[in-house]
């Protein structure tokens, strides 16, 4: 079978399975298999595939036909130009979130030359924390998640980008690890293990950041069943489920984040399409100053930036 025949046949199969952009998806999978840039396939249409290559492609196409996301099959995605490993334990980073990360590192960069600190709440693959650390070399980042498996992946991704030194990974349900009596479940260098750090209660209680940044779960619970299979069946439920109206994490952040922000610090949050007004109200009700609501590349309001009314250093 030639490259062109394999592409045509596979794309037809994926179309029948309801996969969006079946030809593009096939080309990306075949290019990954053959370790070629996708465009190079076009120069190789007449090449005959070796039997092992046909088998490999068949396996990839079967998985994609079962609606497994392309990124899980290839094992990685690109976020802010960084290659990020993905698996079933963490949300696949979305392009919209690149804008959130960019707003974050631009803000941290305004604080240079002083070292700045950021908290990435619900880090998943670690994509935001890593982008902040890579793009803003003076930043120190704390990345939290309730999922130890997500944190293990995030830590592996940080190592891959030489950012592990400047990112501390903490397992925490919301702010619980910061608020408890200094008991923090840490993710040390190699594998996940739990350590109880009793000795630094006071420093933990004083943990304050210039930036709290998060893309929290925001899908209303009942809507999860209606999502595309790639999301519904492969992104972890804990990364999607925002409670009955999707706003649970915003209420939590609005109510609990202030003590963890330095004077002049900002919170930056991604949210779902159509949630802007409700989230603005949640933050204003908790006496935050909403500085901006930013749109994504499709002109939909997707990011809230707010400050406390603590006095700024500046
Ligand atoms: C929408 S995903 C975002 C992941 C990543 N920051 C991104 O933008 O791709 C939300 C993350 O919040 C985490 N999470 C869910 N509930 C949490 C909780 N109670 N405390 C801390 N993190 C939580 C999930 O495990 C998931 O990794």
Image (spheres, rainbow, N blue to C red):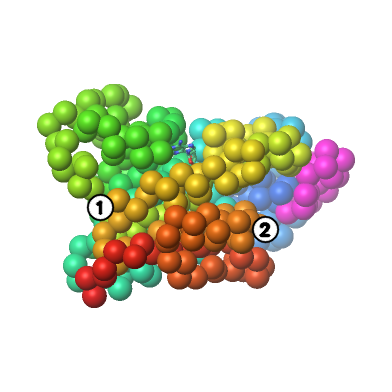
Which residue sits at x=54%, y=39%? Answer: 239
Which residue sits at x=64%, y=43%? Answer: 245
Instruction: Please check the rendered image and state whether residue 267 is part of the magenta-colored stretch, yes or no.
Output: no
Label 2 CB less than 8 angstroms from ligand 1: no
Q: Which residues are magenta?
A: 1-24
Q: Which mark is residue 156?
A: none
Judged from the image, the secondary structure of the residue bearing numbered disc 2 is loop
Q: Position of residue 199 (x, y in %)?
A: 12, 31
| Foreground residue among 142 and 12 | 142
Per the model, the C-alpha gap separating discs 2 and 1 is 31 Å
Judged from the image, the secondary structure of the residue bearing numbered disc 1 is loop
Instruction: Please check the rendered image and state whether residue 22 is part of the magenta-colored stretch, yes or no.
Output: yes
| Residue 142 sits above or below residue 293 on the image | above
- Looking at marks 2 and 1 on the same chain, the residue that comes earlier in the sequence is marked by 1
Is residue 91 visible in this depiction of the protein? no
Pointer 1 residue: 208
Disc 2, disc 1: CB below 8 Å?
no
Q: Position of residue 272 (x, y in %)?
A: 62, 54
| Residue 146 sits above or below residue 308 on the image | above
Quarter-of-image position of residue 136: bottom left
Which residue sits at x=76%, y=39%? Answer: 226
Compared across the picture, whether 268 is left or right of 97 comes to: left
- Count neighbours of disc 1 (C-alpha within 10 A) and say few if under 14, some if 14 to 19, many if 20 or more: many
Q: Position of residue 63 (x, y in %)?
A: 70, 33
Pointer 2 residue: 274
Which residue sits at x=41%, y=55%? Answer: 213
Is residue 286 visible in this depiction of the protein? yes
């Amino acid at each position: 079978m030639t490259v062109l025949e394999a592409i045509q046949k596979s794309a037809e199969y994926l179309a029948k399975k309801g996969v969006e952009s079946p030809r593009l998806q096939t080309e990306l999978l075949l290019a990954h298999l053959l370790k070629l840039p996708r465009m190079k396939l076009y120069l190789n249409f007449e090449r005959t595939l070796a039997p092992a290559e046909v088998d490999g492609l068949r396996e990839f196409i079967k998985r994609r036909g079962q609606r497994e996301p392309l990124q899980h099959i290839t094992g990685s995605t690109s976020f802010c130009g960084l290659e990020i490993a993905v698996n079933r334990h963490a949300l696949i980073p979305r392009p919209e979130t690149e804008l959130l990360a960019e707003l974050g590192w631009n803000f941290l960069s305004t604080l240079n030359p002083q070292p700045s600190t950021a908290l990435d709440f619900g880090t998943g693959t670690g994509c935001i924390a890593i982008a902040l650390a890579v793009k803003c070399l003076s930043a120190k980042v704390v990345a939290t998640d309730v999922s130890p498996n997500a944190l293990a992946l995030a830590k592996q991704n940080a190592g891959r980008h030489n950012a592990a030194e400047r990112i501390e990974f903490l397992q925490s349900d919301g702010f619980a690890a910061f608020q408890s009596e200094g008991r923090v479940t840490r993710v040390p260098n190699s594998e996940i293990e739990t350590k109880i750090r009793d000795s630094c209660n006071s420093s933990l209680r004083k943990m304050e950041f210039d930036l709290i940044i998060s893309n929290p779960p925001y899908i209303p619970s009942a809507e999860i069943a209606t999502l595309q299979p790639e999301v519904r069946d492969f992104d972890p439920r804990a990364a999607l489920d925002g409670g009955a109206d999707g706003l649970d994490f915003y209420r939590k952040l609005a109510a609990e984040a202030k003590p963890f922000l330095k004077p002049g610090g900002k919170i930056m949050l991604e949210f779902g399409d159509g949630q802007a007004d409700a989230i603005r109200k949640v933050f204003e009700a908790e006496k935050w100053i909403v500085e901006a609501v930013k749109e994504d590349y499709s002109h939909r309001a997707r990011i809230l930036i707010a400050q406390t009314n603590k006095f700024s250093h500046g």
